[in-house]
Image (spheres, rainbow, N blue to C red):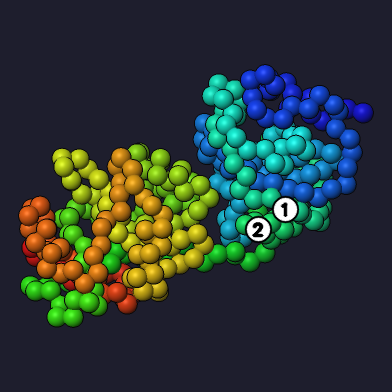
Amino acid sequence: MSDKLERYRKKRDAERTPEPVPEATPSPSDGHAFVIQEHHARSLHWDLRLERDGVLVSWAVPKGLPGDPGTNHLAVHTEDHPMEYLTFHGEIPQGEYGGGTMTIWDTGSYETEKWSDREVKFVLHGERASGRFVLFQTRGKNWMIHRMDPPARDPLPSVEPMLPTERAKPPRDTSAYAFEFAFGGRRLLVPVEGGRTAAAREHPWLRELAASFGSRTAVLDGELATLGGAEILVFYDLLYDDGHSLVAEPYTTRRAALEALGLSGGHWQTAPSWPGEAGPVRRAAREQGLPGVIAKRLTSPYEPGPSKSWLLIPS
């Protein structure tokens, strides 16, 4: 019987990597376990592994599982992995094959609908990943993965930024608003999907931010501002989070979801917000030489274009 782990062993040195490197030839099995690992290696990707005949047949999926049947994702067929990899997570040393951090993104069982050399149809039953998928070979080790059932999430919103209406004085009912600094910078919507963002084409440093999201999909609203002599991307709204559109949700819900992300880095931060604090925030804006403050109605949804729910009040 051929050793299905021969290629796996040749790529790894058991004395240098914490990965399991079993010496024995795997025994046939009829189990149906799967694992998806998030792998921060040279480039972020997800490893899909399906138990088959005593090993984990594996594909590297750069953008993760597709959430919509209208979009197929690349899946690169890699060497079979040992069953012990079902529970493996840790740091593979740099310089070794696959060097980087690996975490378990999801695990569970699956059903096989078809398995051939060029096509695999299966149904995942996991905590985060579920549904019918098909893997099909395109060329060499390159395959594609397609979702066969309906979308598992809301579609990404395609909207224009919400813009404030200028007003000379704060609203009378300040308790109905949150107050934020107006930075006078350039607005920037940042979509993040599969650990990547199209905004990185213009701002390469956003690749680090996108990678930190892993498989979490989001659309962030922010502003490129100059603070302390440095350009900072200040985020103050969240339009989409982890498969759910927040556009119709009130400001308070979107703001809570944004703050829960804990966005803070060398080039970006979450804008501070003070509900009901019109006077102090306006004075602070004046002292810092900022153009003014934005009053945002707590109950307002995200409305593309000019809106009377956001008020720009000069400092």
Residue 163 at least partly seen: no
The one of 29 and 77 positioned closer to us in this rendering: 29
Q: Quadrant of the C terminus?
A: bottom left
Question: Residue at label 1?
Answer: 108
Residue found at x 75% / y 45%: 50
Q: Marks 2 and 1: CB-CB under 8 Å?
A: yes
Q: Quadrant of the N terminus?
A: top right
> What's the CA distance linking mark 2 and mark 1?
7 Å
Q: Position of residue 162 (x, y in %)?
A: 28, 67
Q: Residue furthest bottom?
A: 173
Q: Secondary structure at mark 1?
A: strand
Q: Secondary structure at mark 2?
A: loop
Q: Position of residue 74 (x, y in %)?
A: 60, 44
Residue 150 position (above or below residue 84): below
Residue found at x 32% / y 77%: 299
The one of 48 and 101 positioned closer to us in this rendering: 101
Q: How many marks?
A: 2
Amino acid type shown at disc 1 = Gly
Question: Residue at label 2?
Answer: 127
Q: Is 242 positioned to the left or the right of 165 in the image?
A: right
Q: Position of residue 127 (x, y in %)?
A: 65, 58
Q: Position of residue 129 (x, y in %)?
A: 64, 56
Residue found at x 30% / y 46%: 268
Q: Is 138 positioned to the left or the right of 192 in the image?
A: right
The one of 23 and 142 positioned closer to us in this rendering: 23
Residue found at x 35% / y 39%: 204
